[in-house]
Amino acid sequence: MDTLVKVDNLHFQIQGRHILKDVSFEVYRGEIFTILGGSGSGKTTITKCIVGLFRPTSGKVEVFGRDISKLSPIELDEVRKSIGYVFQGAALFDSLRVWENVVFYQLEHGKHEETYLKQLALEKLRMVGLSEEHLDLYPSELSGGMKKRVGIARAIATHPELVIYDEPTSGLDPITSRVIDELIRSLRDKTGSTALVVSHDLVSAFSISDRIMIIRDGQVVQIGRVEEIMNSPIEFVREFLKKGLGDIQAVRRG
């Protein structure tokens, strides 16, 4: 399989705390790979190492075949152009209108006309289920689910090969969460991109993922396809699923 992200023996320490311990996994092109774990388990730290915000204490992180820790700032910026990042709280700029949030990268790095940028923003907004009437709104005028959609539209505005979703259903009601789940799946299918999802939402993870990695205290407990995780022989995984899902059968995909 074509590997987009390869993490080998990743360790990360900060201020004497060992956050990640010997983490190894691969993300394949075109799949939805979910990192699942409780709060403080190290999920988001892994993604920050992937995009080069954190430098590993030891081990290697390769993205698109390039060792992230060995790249210059200019080279790292080139790699980041092919990565979309959806922040947990959407992280929209309150002083910017929706369309300006969506094409923020282009506003900062390009010389495009406003007409072109608005059209690009509208194209991406339509992909996430929003419309022209949302273009000139401000984030304060949006619901939580709409803000999340705008955050996703911004993440895909640079046509990335890899989209990282940090807790995409956090803070949303169950119905809106399932809508976001479906959106993640449909965007993967429509754009041919790869999705790396960080989540503690077990229903979401088992609904959208091709493979799941469960981590605990910065260590990998198990990696496998949905059925393999559901039928795990590992006691911690079984207890984790029982507490988070109850009846596992209820979230099995058809």
Image (spheres, grey):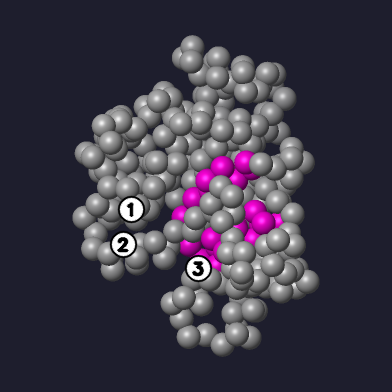
Work out how far the residue at label 1 is from the one at label 3, CA to CA, in angstroms. Answer: 18 Å
Badge 1: residue crowd in 10 Å (few <14, some 14–19, many ≥20): many
Task: Tell me what residue is drawn at x 64 percent, y 79 percent.
Answer: 118
Tell me, yes or no, whether the two marked residues, 2 and 1, touch with CB atoms within 8 Å. Answer: yes
**Residue 76, which numbered label?**
2
Amino acid type, callout 3: Thr
**Can you identify the residue that label 1 sits on?**
52
Q: Is residue 225 visible?
A: no
Q: Secondary structure at mark 1?
A: loop
Please tell me whether mark 3 sits on a helix, a strand or a loop.
loop
Q: Which residue is drawn at the image coordinates 65% and 23% (left, top)? A: 245
On the image, which quarter does residue 253 sit in? Answer: top right
The disc labelled 1 sits on which kind of residue?
Answer: Gly
Quadrant of the image occupied by residue 199: top right
- Around disc 3, counting alpha carbons within 10 Å, would you say few (fewer than 14), some (14 to 19), or many (20 or more)? some
For the residues bearing labels 3 and 2, Cβ distance under 8 angstroms: no
Q: Earlier in the sequence, mark 2 or mark 1?
A: 1
- Earlier along the polypeptide chain: callout 3 or callout 2? 2
Q: The N terminus appears in which quarter of the rendering?
A: top left
Image coords of residue 215 (percent x, y): 44, 28
* 253 in the magenta segment: no
Residue 231 appears at what percent x and percent y?
55, 18
Numbered badge on residue 158: 3
| In front of the other: 63 or 43 | 43
Q: Is residue 167 magenta?
A: yes
Residue range (magenta): 146-170
User: At which x and y percent is residue 80?
Assistant: 39, 61
